[in-house]
Image (cartoon, helix red, strand yellow):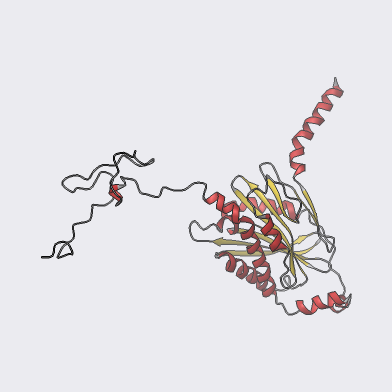
Amino acid sequence: MIEPVFVRLVVLLLFVLAPRAAYAFDFEGEHDELKLHVEPEAGERLCVAWPKGHADPTACEGLDLDGVAGAAAQKRAGFSTTAVFAFRRGDAILIAMVIEGDVAGALDDPDEYLQGIEKGVTGQSGGKVEKRDHVTTRIAGREALKYEFTLSFPPGAPAEKVFGFQRGYHFDARKYGYSVTFTSSRGERAWVERVADRVTRTISAAQPSSRSKRDRDDDDDDDDKKSKRSSKLTPFEQGEIVGRIIAILGVVALGIWLLVRLTRKKPPTHPTGGFYAQGGPPQHPHYPPQQGHPPLQPPPPDNRPLPGASYPPPPPPLGPGPYNRK
């Protein structure tokens, strides 16, 4: 009796856990032995938007994957996007991305670096930073910068669904620096924090080299070219590039998704009341009343406003006109 029960229990556990494991993704970067594990929790769906070829059709429904691939494949002054993930939960969405740069300096002047990110994100999204915080933490056994942005947007702005709250990290590895960011709406702050905590705990990477910068620059000609180019970028400029990448990829990924969500429920185009009372023509007797509006009525003989009208009819024109001139 014990063995069949045990077998059934194992099968049941595999059935319950299989949906989650099927959508997990183990990411490996091309440099610095960078690795991280991304897995959705109950109620979440995971879309691997970049690298290409790992997208789940259901979780990625509505996202512009071709647009993400085109934007992520572009390098900007030594920075490249190595991974883009989208977590879905109901109508909410969270964008996570990994950005690799062949520069350093964010940890030397975090304030300047974050000012650059702020300019890059707000310049592309149209938002305004209300609050910005940063602390020093540790990721994969080395010092890292952890920061948060809270942005405000005009009421109803679509960008708030993506850029209202952002949590980000920056750390250095053997040859490159890495920015890992998580962004969603302000109302999803707790969700962003949970996803960021569990993903960053899985990060591993080669430790930063202890050699001098001059020795690292002499590794080969390619590294020498990178060093010369990178030395011209200040921490502010580095942050601005990272911020622009975050904003551009977020907007590209959500272009179709936001359009679908925003057009799903349309508000009524006319105020409550008869169409005639709102300045439209009287209803033709052979057409039924418009759906969603009360039956139309002819104007009262004494020129009083119709029931439900929000304003009285305009007074007749005064003075001489084209039809009453003598």
Name the one closer to the observer, 285 or 27: 285
Residue sticking out furthest to the left? 326
Q: Quadrant of the C terminus?
A: bottom left
Name the one closer to the observer, 29 or 321: 321
Name the one closer to the observer, 228 or 323: 323
Does residue 110 appear in the picture of this structure? Answer: no
Whole-percent x and y of residue 1? 85, 19
Does 324 sit left or right of 52 as displayed?
A: left
Total label count?
0
Which residue is rendered at x = 79% and y = 80% of the image? 228
> Does residue 69 lie above or below 296 as drawn?
below
Whole-percent x and y of residue 51? 76, 56
Whole-percent x and y of residue 255? 60, 56
Residue sticking out furthest to the top? 1
Which residue is rendered at x = 69% and y = 46% of the image? 57
Does 24 sit left or right of 117 as displayed?
A: right
> Does residue 288 lie above or below 124 as drawn?
above
Whole-percent x and y of residue 102? 78, 71
Q: Image quadrant of residue 14?
A: top right
Does residue 197 appear in the picture of this structure? Answer: yes
Which residue is rendered at x = 61% and y = 66% of the image? 121
Which residue is rendered at x = 79% and y = 56% of the image? 203
